[in-house]
Image (spheres, helix red, strand yellow):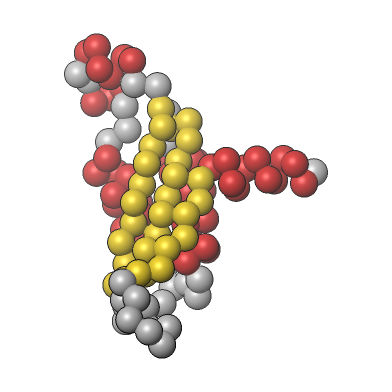
Amino acid sequence: MVGTHFSVDCTLHMDCRATIQYDDLSKTVNYQDVYSLIAQEMKQPSSILEHIAYRIVKQIHHQFPKVARVEIMVHKLNPQIGEKVGKVSVGLSTKDIFQRTIESE
C-alpha cells in the first residue's frame, strides 16, 4: 500500500489502578513506545488493511503484557475506489484474533 495516507486509532485496555495512585510511568504502558511500534508496522508493505491491523494487535499483545485488550482501527484516507470517499477502515481487537484461534482448535 504505497503512495497513500493512513491513520490508526489504538485503544489499550489495562488495569491502571497502580498508575493513577502513584503517577509512575513504570506501572503503565509508555504510549511513545506503542506509537513507535505502530509506526514501524505501518512502514511494512501490505496489500490489505486487515493484515496491517492484525500485525499491530499481535505485536502490542506480545510486547506489552500489561495490556489486557487491544483495539486497532486502520483507516486508508481518500481511497481510489471510483467515488469520492473520505476513508475506508478496518478494525480488529485481541478478542477477534485470539478468541477465534482458541474456538477453532
Quick check: 68 above or below 89?
A: above
The residue shown at (59%, 46%) is 96
Query: For residue 34, what is the image quadrant?
Result: top left
Quick check: 12 above or below 7?
A: above
Viewport quadrant of the N terminus = bottom left
- Residue 61 visible to an observer of this rendering: yes
Query: For residue 13, what is the image quadrant?
Result: top left
Residue 27 % position (x, y): 31, 22
Q: Residue furthest bottom?
A: 82
19 to the left or right of 50: left
84 to the left or right of 52: left
The residue shown at (40%, 60%) is 74
Quick check: 43 above or below 10?
A: below
Quick check: 69 above or below 101?
A: above
The residue shown at (33%, 15%) is 17
| Nearer to me, 86 or 3 | 86
48 to the left or right of 98: left
Residue 40 % position (x, y): 35, 59
The residue shown at (42%, 83%) is 81
- Residue 43 visible to an observer of this rendering: no
Q: Residue furthest top?
A: 21
Viewport quadrant of the C terminus = top right
Residue 11 % position (x, y): 37, 41
Residue 87 % position (x, y): 35, 69
| Nearer to me, 58 or 81 | 81
Q: Residue furthest left?
A: 23
